[in-house]
Image (cartoon, coloured by chain):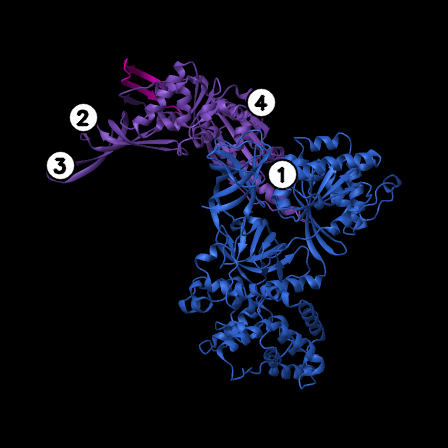
Amino acid sequence: MKQTYRDIDKDGKGQVSLMPEESEDLWHAYNLIAIGDCVTASTIRKVQQESATGSSTSSRVRTTLTIQVEAIDFDTQACALRLKGRNTVENQYVKMGAYHTLDLEQNRKFTLFKVHWDSVAIERVDSACDPTQHADLAAVVMQDGLAFICLVTSAMTLVRNKVEVQIPRKRKGNAQQHEKGLHRFYDTVIQGILRHVNFEVVKCVLIASPGFVKDQFYEYMMQQAMKSDNKVLLDNRGKFLLVHSSSGFKHALKEVLMDPVVTMKLADTKAAGEVKSLEAFYVMLKTEPSRAFYGLKHVQKANEAQAIETLMVSDSLFRAQEVGKRKIYVDLVDSVRDNGGDVKIFSSLHVSGEQLDQLTGVAAILRFPMPDLEEEEISDED
Amino acid sequence: MSRHRSVRGLNYDEEYDDYYCDAYGHSVEDSANFCASPGFEQQYMFDRSKSTAMGDYIVGTNPDEEDDDDDDSDGKDKAMSRRRLDSVHVEFPSNLSPTSEARLKECLEVLRDISGESIPEPFLLNAAIEANYDSNIALQILHDKPRNTEGPSIDIVREGSDASLDDLKAKLETICREDKSARPKVLDKLAPSTSRTASSSKSGSSCSTPRMIISPSPSLSKPSPRESHKAKLDPVAEYEKERKSSQKQCLNMVVIGHVDAGKSTLMGHLLFKMGQVNQKTMHKYEQESKKVGKQSFAFAWVLDETGEERTRGITMDVGLSKFETKTKSVTLLDAPGHKDFIPNMITGASQADVALLVVDATRGEFETGFESGGQTREHALLARSLGVLQMGVVVNKLDNEGWSKQRFEEISHKISAFLTKHVGLRDADVVYIPCSGLTGENLISPPTNDALKSWYSGPCLVDVIEKFRPPERPVSKPLRLSVTDVFKGVSSLVNVSGKVECGFVQAGERLLIMPQAEQCILKAVACENASSGMTAFAGDQVVASLAGIEAQNVSLGSVLCEPQCPVPVATRFVARLVVFGIEIPITRGFPVIFHQNSMSEQAMVVKLIASVHRSTGEILKNKPRCLLKNSSALVVLEVARPICIELYKDVKELGRFTLRCSGATIAAGMITEIL
């Protein structure tokens, strides 16, 4: 993401112009834009014109519109962001208050106006515009008959392809069918890799599996590449990295990102960092349960006592429809920071973020134990 | 079938009978009824609302035994006369009150079930009246009579195959030997036969959960003509008949233990000694393994068949084999010991009734396998939570320790403490055997080695297997066949292998595949451990050939069931968890892998309802924040896509599961409520 203009005054009112450059940037935009904000972007509108004689013609015109957002829609697979809202600025073609849906696209500038830019939003802009945070990574998590091909960027884990092939088991005197099924499975995975992994961007392709599936697969893939003289695979041979995982399901990605071999190669990506802190939380929950809490109510109480050392928040909470709810979490983040605590905002698209989402979305590791907090009932929902 | 047939003038009832008699004679399209006309549909398709009994189909598919007799021309006349006698219309005495008539009918029904068609109807009737409608006494009378009543029909009875008469007598004797107190038991045994047919008419809401429906005897309601003229299939009686004929009890045994404990070698050697592997093959294995420098793996190659397994020298998938002892027919499941293949081991163990836990006696090896991180503990825990109640502990490779008694006792002591305290097996159900899989010491014959002979006088491995008690098979419950493998056979049919968890199945039946909800026709079932190819009962490992379905519509974890009693399908359920020794506590939102039989699926702990006491089950704390190790709790689980599950109290095999996370088994559980 590129920031072309920023004008935010002291009390947080102002606007920022941004240029999304890749699909991940649209995810950032999705997290920035809240209902009620105003967005200016270039768009195409079908305009009907009536001539003096009464005949009407319709034409499509490109124009720049500013709308006040009423609904936000994000498609994670296609990385497309659509904003629905009413026109707020006088325009040659569109009346004031007329509805329009903006499609935010890559490489097209948009301007976002907020009445109040809070710390979380500003941080988001900064981190999105930080060019050092790029570590594009593809991962294939697989087991016999099941594979997930994922793309891992700093803020997103996208499942690009799920491969499921029935492989007959070995049976007396009939190992042939097993081999055949296995090869069919491998072929499908190779197809998936070729289709979904852009080797120009991706720095590393992880192949993770339990047992020997990964080795077998890698061997088979290279053999096939030799046979068919597939330049793409052969040239990028060095980008493949074989890692152990306990299963072929998506959340095994968590283990993969924890693997020391991977962390060395990736430097410190956001995804790996998130996994690490969530792990630390669980370890604390086991060793010293009175220093690890989750759920808004508990965490707030701990914050009042200035006890929070590390706060983990899922970014899905900041996308809350109600302004008030978002404010609660923003205040929590600010206050923890003020008290010298560390705040980690998890991307809900990562595996670890998904897990945190299920764990009410907020969790905290405390500086000192608070046993009386343990006694209190956790609130029923969230 | 003639080509120029008056279709319009057909008597459909007759055609219908014919049609189902030769289940093999027609093609898939014939029976699948795609786009049938309403009339045709009404005639042939199953309609729940019309309360057609399942018996209609079952009876229809029975090959007509009487027709076979017609073929030999010598006995043709006799057979004809016999048949005429058989079909003599039985008139009830007219002076009966309605209640006694009902009782008479009920009694006759019971007699018919037991005798089949070997005794003509008038005899049954007379006996029933004589016995004052008591089926037990009537049986006694029938049993005595054929010898002392020199009536016109005696030659007929005798002429009807002697074998069947003897069989009947044996059966009557066993029943009659039971005194009066045993009578309700006899009737109970017979009850399921009626409940199976009657449940279809009573179905509706109750069919979603399998439940024994105790229905009134069908003789009280009006039986359909088809039902009454042939003996109904009684699962329990059929089951017992079959078991009697094969003489051997079947037993599913899984072999578990730490990697490199010698499971495959032990079993390979056992199979070789039992004569299941011929000399030539064994010689080939020996030569080949010597060539690659792995001579000690020769016996393991009997069970490890894929090239991958042989080159790496470890078992990766469950090896299936069978052998027979004096009284048992054993299906052997050789589970992989390597940590990464525990999902496969779960597949194997969930099909097993008993287990052999193999441990390596070598100093140092036993310790690594048994301490934390080794698979000995995990396997034992898994096997127990998957329903294994008896276990043989094979202390393998004891020859490495010079057959030391001290070592054997040290190991058995350690394992015994673990099995009884943590795993929850009874001491009486665990046997310890010193063995050597490589040399074959103490496998099928008492030890020959002097060092071992001097102190060991216990049983050898085969004797131990012999002494295992096969569990009760839930034959009378509705059919559940869980699929463990799908493959193509020689024909165009889809072959699935799996285990009949409960109920029984017959070739020719129309079945439902859940959760895909696809219908198919069962063309053949072949048991792994029984000779018969037409029926399979609970506990059998079978290969079933299905018609009318594509291979991609069946997957691991699918369940075949009767269309009347489909297995429940759900994604969310309440379960009681027993948490093992875990490193990381379980909270809500915890992602896990859900293993049930051969299926594994992504799942998530959605809610912790309460933590409960491990043994008493009383609630310790509502809504706990997390579950620590060795605790027990009620939780809500959600799986990523619909799966077939049953309540634990209904069908144990489908009601229990294990949860795994990052390569370790974290909990076992049973389903208590489907949401």
Chain coloured purple in this rendering: A
Residues packed near mark 4 inside 10 Å, few (<14), some (14 to 19) or many (20 plus):
few
Residue at 32% across, 26% down: A33
Helix or strand or loop: what does disc 4 sit on?
helix
Residues drawn in magenta: A2-22
Label ID, residue A51: 3
Amino acid on which the number 1 mark rests in the picture: Ile
**Where does label 4 land, which residue?**
A260
**Magenta span contains residue B73:** no
Q: Which residue is the extreme one toward the front?
A: B181
Amino acid on which the number 3 mark rests in the picture: Ser
**Spatial distance from mark 3 to mark 2, Cα to Cα?**
22 Å
Identify whether B649 is placed above or below A221.
Answer: below
Label ID, residue A90: 2
Chain B rendering hue: blue
Q: Which residue is the extreme one toward the left?
A: A52
